[in-house]
Amino acid sequence: LSALLAEATSDAIYMDAATESAAFIYNHLRNADNVVQDGIDASANSSCSLDSIQAPYNAGLMIEGLTILYSITQNASIYDL
């Protein structure tokens, strides 16, 4: 969403949010097989581990957001994600 808002408004706040969101997803929601997980398990005994849900829409949303972010910035490091 933040990438779409950055594209639509050219507002730096949305650009920063899109960049930070992409970094968070890449660094914290990917498993060892580079699959984007659905979220983090925050239950009492989970130690904030990745949940086991691997829904295809997660990868699709990541691809869409990164594509929009790359189209705005032309930053090769985003393209490489």
Image (cartoon, rainbow, N blue to C red):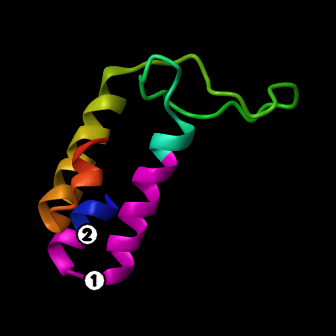
Q: Does 20 sit above or below residue 25?
A: below
Residue 54 percent across, percent down from the top left = 44, 18
Alpha-carbon distance for marks 2 and 1?
8 Å
Residue at mark 1: 11
Decide if residue 22 is on the left or right side of residue 81. right
Tell me where residue 34 sits by quadrant: top left
Residue 69 painted magenta:
no
Q: Amino acid at mark 2?
A: Leu
Q: Are there few (<14), some (14-19), or many (20+) residues within 10 Å of tag 1?
A: few
Residue 80 image offset from top left, x and y in percent: 26, 42
Mark 1 residue element:
loop
Report the disc number at residue 5.
Answer: 2
The amino acid on which the numbered mark 1 sits, given as a three-letter code, is Asp
Residue 64, quarter of picture: top left
10 Å crowding of disc 2: few (<14), some (14-19), many (20+): some
- Report the number of discs: 2
Horizontal side, residue 56 vs residue 16: left or right: left
| Residue at x-position 63% and y-position 27% | 50
Quadrant housing the N terminus:
bottom left
Q: Is residue 69 above or below residue 79?
A: below
Q: Main secondary structure of the magenta part?
A: helix
Q: Tell whether label 1 touches label 2 (CB within 8 Å).
A: yes
| Residue at the image point whose x is 53% and y is 42% from the top | 27
User: Residue at point 87% right, 25% down?
Assistant: 45
Residue span colored magenta: 6-24
